[in-house]
Amino acid sequence: MDKILVAASNGLRREEPNSSGVSLSTDVAMPSPSKAAAKRKTDGSEDCQPPAKKPAPTIRVDGGFKWNLQALAKAADAVGSGGKSPVSALNELGLKVHYSITKQEGPAHCPNFNVTVTVANMTFRGAGHSKREARASAARACLAALLARAGRVLPQPGPPPDFTSDDPAKYTIADFQCLEARGVRPTDNKIIPMPNLFGPSAVLPTAKSPINILHEQYPGLTFKCTFGDGSPLDSTQAPAQLSHSMRFKVVCQIKDQLFEGYGSSKKLAKLATARAALGELCERGVLGAELAPADALPQLLADHVAKIVNEKFNELMRGDLVHSKRKVLAGIVITVENNIESAKVIAVATGTKCVSGEHISVRGQAVNDGHAEVVARRCLQRFLYSQLLLYANAEDPTKMIPESELEPIPGGGYQMKEDRRVHLYVSTAPCGDGRIFSPHENYNPEPDRHPNRLARGQLRTKIESGEGTIPVKNSSNVVQTWDGLLQGERLLTMSCSDKMARWCVLGLQGALLGRLLRPVYPHSLVLGSLLHQHHMYRALCGRVEALISSLPPPYQLRRPRLARALSMEARTPARAPSFSVCWAVTAPMAEVINSTTGKLESGHPSLVCKQTMFARWHHLVRRLPLLAQDEASPPLPGLPDDLDHVLYSEAKLLCSPYQEAKECLINAFDRAQLGRWIKKPEEQDQFQCEILNADPTILFA
């Protein structure tokens, strides 16, 4: 028996008649005449046989193959209308299709591919700048050749767009989608657009990759890839201390300038390097792009701040695999103006947990908030105390010390030198309002009427023994009490976004240093990931800028510059560790704080706890001139005679302008109906200084 190849009913059929002229099929078994007659009698349809099915029209090609013309016409119409790609239309005909790449040429940023497609015994060729484009070209050539045998012409795609034209595009991407995807329905031979339930969706313009743009501008540009610490990729063992986001490093040189980027993969590191180079060239107008806003932080500086903070952390944790694990990394860098060469890391910290309610201390020996941003700020305060100690040990505390970051103020007190800039780096968006957004949705300027979105802008609190925040309106214990916490109430701590909004008004120095130092405001905030300019600005300043007023001098609302490092921080879904690593430039090594107890793992208090800060304040206020009061402000309260018995809460009240500015901020949140600031129990600040007459070299280490 001859072999017959039978494809799908709408596909390909190869027939070879036998000697009797009857076509046989190995796929379909024909019933015998007796069985067929018996079935007709049983059904009572002996005289009512169905009419014979008319065979579908076909076209014959070489090799004895026949093609279903109706299925082919439908495929051609789908391709011509843009509803299907040539590759999909060819595959849906039920045929065995084989593609192969025959040639690849051209530069890496603009390659050319030649692809052949084999269908039955026919071969067609196609070319394109990508494999997908070349396959589509070959499939289109196949469909066009078959239609030509049937006397039809496959519609050709429109002319390529003219990017030099000033006229708007006649067609958009949505015009080339299928009718179902475009949301249209036929009614009375007319196509009526169906309404979009989610409103008009903007068509995002396609853009070239920064790597392609650099290759076009600088042919022959090379990228050198190494591990994050600079070791070659062919090393016997990869460095174990590198963070996941800085595993690979890519460097490229354009003229006399080097650019580098980091990433969790080689591709991401190369992309970060290209973005850094392209951003710098655009800022200098080399590529003719729009210049960055005048008040924007230079991208190279933002990348450098992120780099040196990560490098310092890796240096501190070298050889410590346990405590090198982290989920959030924060650091503070001081520069002279925006000079990269002058950048100096002041503080580095990690952590995402808060102290347990049963471990809060009545002696100020526990660190309540172990989040990286908050601990880094306490390390900065530790550095500021050491800078003031230089003046306390000098013969004349009113004479400027060149190596100090501070300078004396005529009349009393000190301030950060005018050319100094404080930059805060966080590896991800701070918890709270600054992180309540979807990173893959575009900003819509229209008001969001969804009731769940009313929580945007609300003050939020961290939850004890957990991650994430909740609005203060959903908190059960708005007024926290000491006995309530010991009975099992969950300790609530204000979110990092809310605390950073407070720093933009009150400064980073705190209430104790407010009697000696003018406010130290953050100049910029650099994030490693999850930066949304609109949401971050709202969290820091936008919520209160229209409602806060009558701030006592020298306090004011400062708007930090926002930037994101191009070497993006990788998302780590693993569970966060229950410790916080903190380091200040005054210390030779880092401390590891147990986030649950708020103390060191040895059980001793940390050098950034309230008790040690209070002891440093006691040492300095006796030896330095206090900050002079402003002419338009009421007189400041003087120091009490019995300073040794002053409570910590009473010492903070001695800086009345700070307390007044703090109350203005809390009232601004309240007037905006964003919630009320939740405070810790009053008992935790009612302690005296226990470290009197300590050795300054140990106390300020």
Image (cartoon, helix red, strand yellow):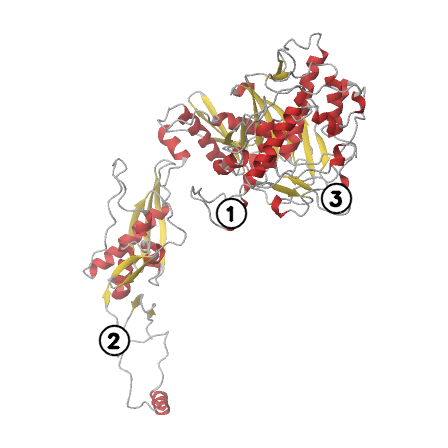
What distance separates the C-alpha of mark 1 from that of mark 2?
62 Å
Q: Residue 54, which numbered label?
A: 2
Position of 277 compared to 408: left or right? left
Name the residue nearer the viewer: 159 or 300.
Answer: 300
Instruction: Give the percent coordinates (x, y) of residue 611.
Output: 76, 28
Residue 103 occupies which quadrant of the picture?
top left
Name the residue nearer the viewer: 674 or 114.
Answer: 674
Name the residue nearer the viewer: 332 or 315.
Answer: 332
Residue 314 occupies which quadrant of the picture?
top right
Q: Looking at the figure, which quarter contains the N terminus? A: bottom left
Residue at 47% from the left image edge and 31% from the top image edge: 273
Residue at 69% from the left image edge and 42% from the top image edge: 479
Instruction: Give the percent coordinates (x, y) of residue 345.
Output: 61, 24
Residue 312 occupies which quadrant of the picture?
top right
Position of 278 compared to 308: left or right? left
Is disc 2 placed on a helix, strand or loop?
loop
What is the count of numbered marks?
Answer: 3
Question: Sequence-wise, which precedes: disc 1 or disc 2?
Answer: 2
Q: Residue 485, which numbered label?
A: 3
What distance separates the C-alpha of mark 3 from that of mark 1?
31 Å
Task: Tell me which amino acid carries mark 2.
Answer: Lys
What distance separates the C-alpha of mark 3 from that of mark 2?
85 Å
